[in-house]
Image: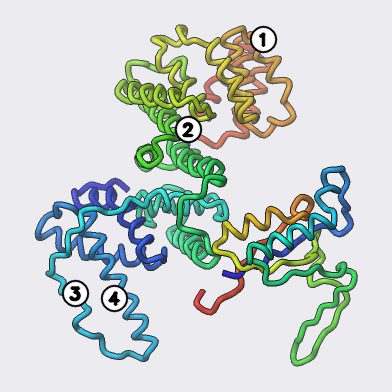
Amino acid sequence: MSATTPIEKTFREEHGRVLAALIGHLGDFELAEDALQDALVNALERWQMDGVPRNPGAWLLTVAKRRAIDRLRRSATLERNALPLDPEIIPAPQEEPDMDDSIPDERLKLMFTCCHPALALEAQVALTLHTLGGLSTPEVARAFLVSEPTMAQRLARARKKIRDAGIPYRVPPADLLPERLDALLAVIYLIFNEGYAASSGDTLTRQELCGEAIRLGRVLLHLLPQSAEARGLLALMLLHDSRREARLNEAGELVLLNEQDRSRWDKAKIEEGIAILDEALALYNPGPYQVQAAISALHAEARTGDATDWHQIAALYDSLARMTPSVVVEVNRAVAIAMARGAQEGLQLLLHFESQADGYYPYHAARADLLRRTNQRDAAADAYERALTLCGNSAERAYLQRRLDEMLKDTI
Amino acid sequence: MKYMLLMYGDESIQPQTPEEQQAHTQENWFALMEEMKAAGVLVTQNGLSPVATATTVRVREGKALITDGPFAETHEQLGGFFLLNCKDLDEALRWAAKIPSATLGSIEVRPLWSPDA
């Protein structure tokens, strides 16, 4: 799904903005998408000969508006039993479209529509990547490991529901905005995580999902500069992404944060992430993404694993657990407390929610690591085994298997 | 756009906690209907008699088959409806969330079928 040629790159960059403006203009999601497809076909032919125009977005929007009119006339004509088209209204293909430099930026409306809670989450994700990211249906299908017809159907259903159920094309009013923004941020973060911690799929596609999520995060920040959490999310994604290269070893095995080669961390991403986090914190409107970004920043700032400020991280997990209580947060909190105040204390904490976390492999993996560090080898081996039966990610499985083998070897 | 708000709930469950009972008083239902009328969205509304009164008809090979009971035995039963004229889905969802029985059962929001959809 990499956009390689300059034309493809331009398509990808302009897609969301042009489509958003086109939907606003036409009031019809489906027609807008079809007309933009037509315009892209036209553009591909023209630009290969003449080069990419000065304002490719405006070019595409103008041509797409005409193609939409063509389509409307064609279907009206079909209904009237094929009356001949008035030649006046068919624009000559060579004609240079009027250059309207200012495309209204309606991407925020498009984002909120794609992430409307009346759509299934998987449809929200696919639609966001397809419309705003400009990923083709086969590309989205590959990214989520479903067949192309399945993905095409998922997208078509979502578009149909937007129209038939009357999902509005707008930025939600103030009283709905906070919860709708949460949903939008969640979709972007889900795209990122799908790329970052995917349970399967090839590396290249995955990497681009992360890149796409970061790009969407930047667009959102540009459109909603006052949202501290939008900033927090972008910071969090950049900080996580800075460690991508160091996360896996040559064998494709997961390397824990503490053992990563910190020279392989992307310093530019870390700096940008921390700067964006500082801007977010300056807005004095804390939220879970900012807290997670702050935790990630503390890891990024530590020169060595041992220099990590675990007390501060444990305190941040306390706030996170209050904001968004969940087993996931509790497991991380227990690990941070184990690092700050000793493995035994972490193990005690884990025990509290054993029943809720039984099917969650990171719980067993965390418990196994703490048991290993307190030299309880049999119990550690059992916990690694339990984690292995629940974990589907090959990189993490490789790590767990290696630890399990160590435990078994040492006990013999 | 016209939206049907279908109210589903378990007929055998009555409001238990004081908050639930408070939400289900007659006054609250009337107040909601007045609010809908004042907003100009209410087309019509009604409640249904309990599912024990339901009779189902199917026509097969030209013959009407009549059976006792609802078309499917489900955990939650259709208990009533509102038909509203709303600007968009968000407005319909807002009204749905105000229906007292939403605190116990669920409200299914469906646009009426339209020929161009």
Write down the residue under mark 3. A91
Q: Are marks 1 and 2 on the same chain?
A: yes
Is A34 positioned to the left or the right of A373 in the image? left
Callouts 4 and 3 close, C-beta under 8 Å: no
Residue A286 x %, y % = 52, 26
Residue B32 x %, y % = 73, 58
Whichever of callouts 1 and 2 sits on the residue coming sooner in the sequence is 2
Position of the N terminus of chain B, as image quadrant, is bottom right
Q: Quadrant of residue A58?
A: bottom left
**Residue at horizontal 31 percent and vertical 70 percent from the top:** A68
Give the foreground label among 4 and 1.
Answer: 4
Q: Give residue A344's mark.
A: 1
Whichever of callouts 2 and 3 sits on the residue coming sooner in the sequence is 3
Is A336 positioned to the left or the right of B52 in the image? left
Asked if residue A145 can be seen in this view, the reply is no
**Residue at horizontal 72 percent and vertical 20 percent from the top:** A351
Amino acid type indicated by mark 1: Gln
